[in-house]
Structures are given as structure tokens and as C-alpha cells.
Image (tube, coloured by chain):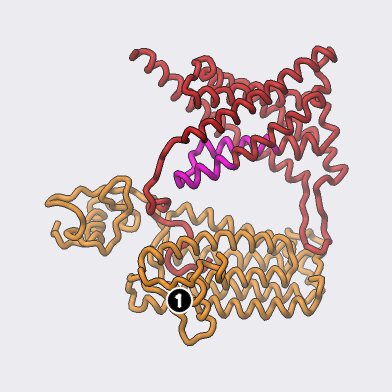
Amino acid sequence: VEPNATIREIRLMFHKLYPRWYPARQSIKLDPKGKSLRDEEILQHLPVGTTATLYFKDLGPQIGWTTVFLIEYTGPLFIYFLFYFRMPFVYGLDERFTSSPHPVVNLACICHSFHYIKRLIETVFVHRFSHGTMPLRNIVKNCLYYWGFAAWLAYYINHPLYTPPSYGKKQINFAVIMFLLCEAGNFSIHVALSDLRRNGSKIRKIPYPTKNPFTWLFFFVSCPNYTYEVGTWISFTIMTQCVPVGLFTLLCFIQMTIWAKDKHCTYLREFKDYPSLRMPIIPFLL
Amino acid sequence: MAASGSGGSRADNGYGSQQPRRRKGPGALATAYLVIYNVVMTAGWLVIAVGLVRAYLAKGSYHSLYYSIEKPLKFFQTGALLESHKYLLIAKYLSGIVPSSVVLTAFQVMSRVFLTWAVTHSVKEVQTEDSVLLFVVAWTITEIIRYSFYTFSLLNHLPYLIKWARYTLFIVLYPMGVSGELLTIYAALPFVRQSGLYSINLPNKYNFSFDYYTFLILVMISYIPIFPQLYFHMLHQRRKVLSHTEEHKKSE
């Protein structure tokens, strides 16, 4: 192997020898307990002598992030419809294909569907992933979570015995406006983050606010996309006044806070001049 | 979740590779605290055991013994929950990972607290059942051995008998306890259905419903995958621990 070979080339060569283990499945390390080496690393820049010992670990069957997201997000979209259109097996034969007298139920369906369609569009056209793949068994776990919760909350919102929000139109209108603002914000952030990586470059850069007012949240927060996402779900909870939705929102919040803190720590580690005002997910607080 | 880049599950090893893993044992103060804690727990379960025996001798039968030990049982079982929760957090933050045995123990404590409060205490009608006695006896013996095991381990003076007992008696006590638990939950079912305990129906302002009856059935079903795992884990531990001691003895 040439001294200036990249890890990527080594992976390809390994794959030729062992066709079963395609490059995405290989984890190549300098030390059995160490971190996996990235594709771009060049052999001679690594701390090795004239002969290098590399350790291989099989990461198991992999699946692309785009594929995962597509499956994860299409599920809730259609599962919600099963409940909205009141398929016979859901609420019993007497209620099959009926529709709710409450306009908020229709609104909730539109919002929920809009949210997942937006996510699907972003997955295809906007997102740029740094890791190409994830282990296959994750998809079972993730789908169970997304699809399961979608079914659970759709069940209650579209139930014949559903009770509309206590404060009526005022509550619903407020929620819709908040929903739209947060969705717009979330989309703006995704576009801004994607622009940081034009031309397929994998270099990490600090995201900064742009002319778009929604991105000004970057002054205060490292991961405003998560902030907006939580906002979206809070608004959906207010709109439907439904405990399962609230629980889902809470779980989303916890999960995204964990991710945001991770991301924030990564940023702080990599960039010495990282803006100090920024908190991970909630301005000044968290 | 929409996350451009990382976030979600990592494809490679994720955890704790930033900070060096500081694996230090408990200091003197922590050891003293742990010893006292385990001694107290051992004593507590001994109290329960003694209470059971006394009540049995006084009454002449083993029915309705639950009432004689109800309070200490609740106290020490719930105390264990709070403590093990703290251990779980400490283990997670110190080492970054939670060893599987801690997770399993936490599971056990949770299920016991559930049985104590959410089933036996809440459904008064099952308190006279024999199945309650079955699991109380199983728990009592197990816990006395377990806490004395911890106590002696901390003092680095573990009698082989205790170690043997801990890793052998479970073979009988575990199924005994599980049977008692399952029978108790099963006995509670009709009363829960009748009284609508802890259940909420539609329609209501918060658009939520919960059926405790179904929940209990799901809990019972969950024993099927979980119990064998715990049992075989303990069997595996037994092989490891007891054969290791034999080798140690042979080499001396």
C-alpha cells in the first residue's frame, strides 16, 4: 500500500478481498479500543511507523441515512391517515369512515401531514449527512418509536369521543401560528446548515445567522433546528390538547436536548473561537 | 428527527471517548456509607423475616401474614428503589456506561416496588392471598443474603457460605418469587376491572385513556421475555463466580 493512501482506498481494497464487508460496514482503527478512522485520513499522516497495524471491526449490516429517514417519516404520514379516515378496524365497525364534527381534527391532520411531508422533502433535497450509514438494527428501533407514537397520538385525536381544546378558537389559532412559525424556522435552519456544506465538502464550520430572521436564533443557540422542532410539537400539543401528544413532545425534547448538548460540546471542542453566548437548545437556559 | 449530520444513533462507537475513564473505587467515606447502608438493609429484611416467623407462631397459620410485616416491607422496598436509582446515576456518570447487572438489578427493584405499591397495597383484596406470602418470603431470604453479601464484600471479608448462598439459592427463590408475583397480579385483575382502579376513560378534557387492567396483563406478559434473561444471567454469573473461587482455592 502506498504511504499516501487514504483510509477510503484501504477500505475499497479490503472490500475486494472480502466482498461481504463493503466499505460502509468496515470500522478501521489504529487501536482495538480506539475510534474509527475517517475516510479522508492519509496513512502517512497517522502516528504509525514503516508498517502500520490496522484493526478491523465489522459494524454489521448498514443502511443509508436517507433510506432510513424516508422509511421513518413515511410511516407516520400514512399511519395517521388510517386513523383520520377511521378505517374499520380502528374504532370499530360502527364508526368506520365517519368524520369528526370538529374542525380542529381536520386541522391537526393537515399539520401533522405537512410536518412529515416537509421532513421527507428535506431528506431528499436539503440534508447533507456526514456519516453515510447507520447499523441496520437501528431502523427497527427508530421505526417502532416513530410509527408507534404516531399511531398512539392519531388514535386519540381522531377518536369519536375526542374533546376539542378548552379555550376554543383562540387556543387553536394561537397554536397554528406558532406551528407555522416553528416549521418555517426549522426549515430555514436546515437550509442554512446545508449551505455550510456546499459542493459535498465534509469540513465542519460554525453556523452563523444569515439575513433570514429565523436564523437569528443562531445568536443564542447551537442547534436552533431542534429548538424549532420542539416548538412545533408544543404548538401541536396546544392545538390538540391531547396528553399523548404532550408525552411525545416531552420525549422529543429530552432526546433533542441530548443531541444538542452533544453537538454543542463537539463545536466547543473543535472551534476555539466558538461564540460563548450560545446555549445548546434553549437560549440562556439549556 | 431532522438532523443534518450527526445526531441519532452513531454508526461507530459513540460513548465517552472524550474524557479519560477514571475508574477509581469508592473512597473511605463512600465505603463507610455503603457499609452502613447495607447493614441497615440487612437488618431491615431480618426484621421482616422475624416478623413473619413471629406472626406465624402467634396465629398458627400462614394466612394473612402480610399485615404483620406490611409497614417494614414497604419502607425497605421503597428505600431500595431510591438508593438503587442513585447507584444507577453514579455508575452512568462515573464510567459513562451502565454495567448490565446494574440495569438488571434496577429492573428487579422497580418490579418489586410495583408489586408492593401498585398491586398489593392498592388492591386490598389480594392482601390475604397466599401468593403474597410466597413472594414476600422469597424476597426476604434473597434480600438478607444479598445485602449481607454486599456488606461483607465491602469489608473485604466475604465468607464463602454467603457467596455460595447468593449464587445458589436464587435457583429456587427466583421462580418462587416470580410465581408469587404473577399469581398476585392475576388475583388482583378482577378487582381492578370491577373498581376501575387507576383507569381513565374517554371522553375527557385531555384526550387520554388508560386501562390499568390491560396494563397489568401486559406486565404479566412482559415476565415471559424478561424472567428467563435474568435467570440465565444469574446462572451464568454463578458459573463464573463459583468456579473462579475454586481455582483460587486450588492455587493456594
Q: Residue at 49% x, 15% y: name it.
A: B160
**Badge 1, how many Cα within 10 Å: few under 14, some, many 20+?**
some
Q: Quadrant of the C terminus of chain A?
A: bottom right
Q: Residue A178: percent from the left, percent from the top?
A: 66, 78
Chain identifier matching the orange colour in the rendered picture: A
Give the residue at mark 1.
Answer: A126
Q: Is residue A189 left or right of residue A177?
A: left
Check the image and report above or below for B197 versus A183: above
> Range of the magenta residues?
B86-113
Q: Secondary structure at mark 1?
A: loop
Q: Residue A218: percent from the left, percent from the top?
A: 49, 76
Identify the hue of chain B: red
The residue positioned farthest toward the bottom in the image shown = A211
Q: Residue at 40% x, 71% y: name it.
A: A274
Q: Residue B120: percent from the left, percent from the top?
A: 78, 34
Q: Is residue B56 left or right of residue A183?
A: right
Q: Nearer the viewer, residue B225 or B147?
A: B147
Q: Is residue B100 left or right of residue B185?
A: left
Q: Is residue B98 magenta?
A: yes
Q: Nearer the viewer, residue A59 or B76?
A: B76
Q: Nearer the viewer, residue A183 or B157?
A: B157
